[in-house]
Image (tube, rainbow, N blue to C red):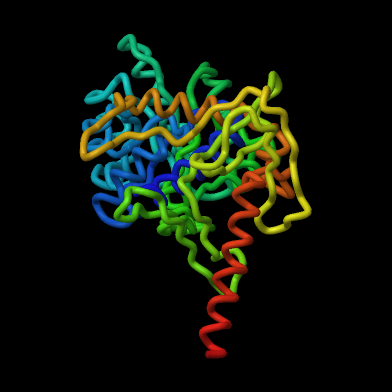
Amino acid sequence: MINFQSLIATKAARMKLVTKGEPVLEFGLRRAQGIDGGLTASRAAYIGGCDATSNVLAGKMFGIPVKGTHAHSWVMSFPTEEDAFETYAQVMPNNTIFLVDTFNTLEGVKKAIEAGNKLRQRGYELGGIRLDSGDLAYLSIEARKLLDEAGFPEASIVASNDLDENIIASLKNQGAKVNVWGVGTKLVTAYDQPALGGVYKLAAIKNDLGEWDYKIKLSEQTIKISTPGVQQVRRFYDANGFIADMIFDTETFTDGQNPVIVDPIDYTKRKRLSFKVPHEDLLVPVFKHGQIVRQLPSITQIRERVKGQLAGLHEGTKRFVNPHPYPVGLEKGLYDFKTDLILRMRNLKNEEQEA
């Protein structure tokens, strides 16, 4: 639940960042991994920043705005493209975004304009068109010209077709005249990184006396050695945004100490902070003794939280290529304890082997 939805929300956030405020629609239900995968992907994508989903059930269950266009099969079900557009406009005059690439994209745009003129005579406006194949940069530029010349400057151009943040960035650099981005497969499957390496490990367990016994899992790989302790994550910030995140042991670290954050992979990288620096503890109990102890936020509140947290990161940290590293590490006392425990455990193992 946490790994998958964190992954999809992150992917959605990356896409939303690169569109620079332009709407992003989640179109991934067809390619999601099963029914529940489609629902959770829609939820996570909305939390991460997508503006709406084509998944009607997700809209019903989670209150996500539902948006979409008709399919190619709609056009193919009629004798002509004109018939398909005009019939759709009759049934849904307030949602007229026509899919124009079923046969010939630019000819389809012209037929959408004809349908738009008839809509206007009835008191409605053409919503726009969707491009789903071909050279999206070139076609969007040419489509924009046709729409503007025909008197539809407000009509949107929606683009889809295996989009991700890198393709969107490339299209924007090419001057594509796209207003709305429909993303599907590469979002709901997190195409370029289909798994998030988050794991749960036992870090402490209470003994018969009610005291914490700290636990550690050793490994031949440093990155796979677990961290002992009753842990909390503290995020430090100033007027310009976030400074660093520190993982600490709530049983041994006391407020009033000047924290030192140690990179667990490279112990020479350390960040020193004053205890007076503003901070927020990120881990908040939801259940205690089987009871809910926190009022659960709505999906809209969660989405706004994500938006605010992303805004707190430096732009260099959000850069896709060679991003500036954001400091995250262990509080020095926890780092030293972990190191000592590793050495003690390994010495004990060596002594057992020698015996």
Q: Position of residue 57 (x, y in %)?
A: 22, 37
Judging depth in this view, the residue of 33 and 5 nearest the camera is 5
Residue plotted at (49% across, 50% down)? 229
Left or right of 347 on screen, residue 302:
left
- Would you place residue 310 above or below residue 342 in this image? above
Residue plotted at (33% across, 55% down)? 207
Residue farthest toward the right in the current orientation of the protein: 268
- Would you place residue 77 above or below residue 62 in this image? below
Please indicate, yes or no, whether residue 161 appears anywhere in the rendered image.
yes
Q: Position of residue 126 (x, y in %)?
A: 40, 21
Quadrant in the rendering for residue 63: top left
Residue farthest toward the bottom in the current orientation of the protein: 355
Judging depth in this view, the residue of 226 and 146 nearest the camera is 226
Judging depth in this view, the residue of 281 and 160 nearest the camera is 281
Quadrant in the rendering for residue 82: top left
Residue plotted at (31% across, 27% down)? 294
- Would you place residue 188 above or below residue 226 in this image? above
Residue farthest toward the front in the current orientation of the protein: 209
Residue plotted at (49% across, 30% down)? 306
Please indicate, yes or no, whether residue 145 appears anywhere in the rendered image.
no
Q: Position of residue 11 (x, y in %)?
A: 51, 45
